[in-house]
């Protein structure tokens, strides 16, 4: 079993394995190039996204972005992320369709041993310094909104249609259609039809404004 295979399966692996180092360098280089493209219409941005996320459809990343590998993060359709998206994808990160993320969101799959002796550096039998690491995957299902400054930890699944409040740290699974917030994040309540913006009259100019937007929504 290669170190990459061990890493993706959540086993202890060698992060300084030459194959993994090459993949990280490539991803970091591509992220740097992406972040230099000021114009969101720059064709180079689209080219980089196709390399890092070949299966993504209509993905919009404001940038800057920071990915460990990129190729182990899978976006669905019509996803959006604001400034400073950071993804440490040593285990797979699966993001569904129409997931929105605010600025400074971090999706972090890596884990380290708790005992200092096990966590510290050592010399590999292959002759170079390294350390022991492992990880757990992250799943964000369809139609979630991850607000600004949220950290999602490894091993977490966020259920379909959920909202994670700003500055939350998600350490455990969140059920579908839930509003969760805090550190650690806890479910506050369910999201229901009563949360519709069309019921909040102060957000609209008049009834005509409401109806014009209502009819514009996908069926």
Image (spheres, rainbow, N blue to C red):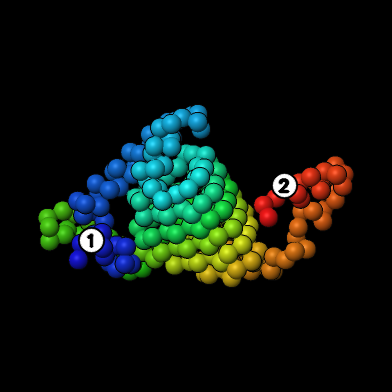
Q: Nearer the viewer, residue 114 or 51?
A: 51
Please tell me how many numbered marks the rendered image carries.
2
The answer to whether marks 1 and 2 mark residues whose Cβ atoms lie closer than 8 Å is no
115 relative to 165, above or below: below
Residue 21 lies left or right of residue 104; in this view the side is left
Instruction: For residue 138, say whether it is visible.
Output: yes
The answer to which image quadrant residue 94 occupies is bottom left
* SS of the residue under disc 1: helix
Which circle's residue, 1 or 2, is located before the other in the chain?
1
Image quarter in which the C terminus is found = bottom right
Q: Nearer the viewer, residue 6 or 97?
A: 97
The answer to which image quadrant residue 91 occupies is bottom left
Q: Residue 122: where, in percent of width, then height?
A: 20, 60
Q: Residue 29: where, in percent of width, then height?
A: 33, 38
On residue 178, which mark appears?
A: none
Residue at (36%, 68%) from the top-left corner? 114
* SS of the residue under disc 2: helix
Residue at (39%, 37%) from the top-left corner? 47
On residue 216, which mark appears?
A: 2
Residue 196 lies left or right of residue 206; in this view the side is left
Residue 90 lies left or right of residue 3; in this view the side is right
Q: Residue 147: where, in percent of width, then height?
A: 60, 52
Residue at (24%, 46%) from the top-left corner? 22
Q: CA distance from mark 1 to mark 2?
A: 50 Å
The residue labelled by disc 1 is: 3
């Amino acid at each position: 079993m290669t170190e990459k295979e061990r890493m993706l399966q959540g086993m202890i692996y060698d992060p300084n394995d030459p194959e993994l180092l090459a993949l990280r360098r490539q991803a970091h280089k591509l992220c740097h190039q992406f972040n230099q493209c000021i114009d969101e219409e720059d064709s180079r941005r689209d080219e980089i996204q196709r390399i890092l996320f070949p299966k993504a459809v209509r993905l919009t990343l404001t940038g800057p972005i920071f990915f460990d590998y990129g190729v182990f993060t899978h976006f669905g359709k019509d996803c959006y992320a604001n400034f400073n998206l950071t993804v440490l994808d040593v285990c797979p990160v699966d993001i569904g369709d129409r997931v929105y993320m605010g600025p400074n969101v971090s999706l972090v799959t890596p884990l380290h041993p708790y005992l200092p002796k096990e966590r510290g550096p050592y010399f590999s039998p292959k002759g170079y310094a390294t350390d022991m690491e492992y990880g757990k995957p992250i799943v964000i299902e369809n139609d979630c909104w991850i607000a600004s400054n949220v950290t999602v930890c490894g091993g977490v699944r966020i259920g379909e249609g959920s909202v994670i409040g700003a500055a939350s740290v998600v350490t455990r699974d969140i059920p579908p259609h839930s509003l969760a917030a805090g550190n650690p994040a806890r479910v506050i309540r369910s999201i229901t039809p009563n949360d519709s913006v069309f019921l909040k009259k102060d957000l609209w100019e008049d009834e005509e404004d409401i109806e014009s937007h209502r009819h514009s929504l996908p069926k």
